[in-house]
Image (tube, rainbow, N blue to C red):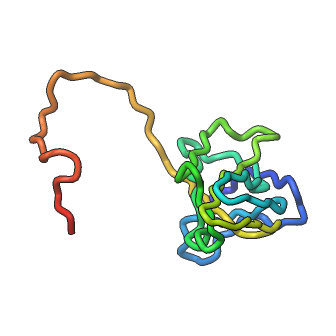
Amino acid sequence: MKKIKIKRFDKELPLPEYKTRGAAGFDLTARETVKIKPGNVGNVMLNIAVQKPKNCFLLLAARSSTFKFGVGPINGIGIGDPDFCGDRDEYRIPLYNYTRKNVVIEKGTRIAQAVFVKFVRANWQEVDKMKNKTRGGFGTTGHK
């Protein structure tokens, strides 16, 4: 395991943790209670600023149980760039309330998860023709 610098904004809340030995993602908790009205988006502060390992970004996503609250990330996933790691760069997740009632995310609720992902930056080489055979287009591998 690699040592990663992390800042908690509320030290009463626990550090993020991997809940099982095989978990790829670590859970993130709401720093404060947030009420989200039906059809609206609420920003849930996640209590951490984190320095990523070299050539990694932080992939932020809902936990598999987040839907049970009646909310989901409005943008699907979030990408925390390597340079988003300043003293006030607290992660947050914008959650859309898709129910007809108010949803309350209580302080300390495990509401999101994050994974460090390696990446490669491209140096584009434009060509007029690709050498590989055309596969048939988007969605052509079947429906089952």
**In this orientation, which residue lies closer to the viewer: 104 or 46?**
104
Q: Quadrant of residue 134?
A: top left
Q: Quadrant of residue 64?
A: bottom right
Residue that protrudes farthest toward the left in the picture:
133
**In this orientation, which residue lies closer to the viewer: 111 or 12?**
111
| Residue 86 % position (x, y) | 76, 38
Q: Is residue 114 left or right of residue 107?
A: left
| Residue 124 % position (x, y) | 34, 25
Residue at 57% over, 58% down: 61
Q: Quadrant of the N terminus?
A: bottom right
Q: Is residue 109 left or right of residue 22?
A: right
Residue at 62% over, 66% down: 99
Q: Quadrant of residue 132?
A: top left
Q: Is residue 117 left or right of residue 92?
A: left
Q: Quadrant of the C terminus?
A: bottom left
| Residue 77 % position (x, y) | 54, 52
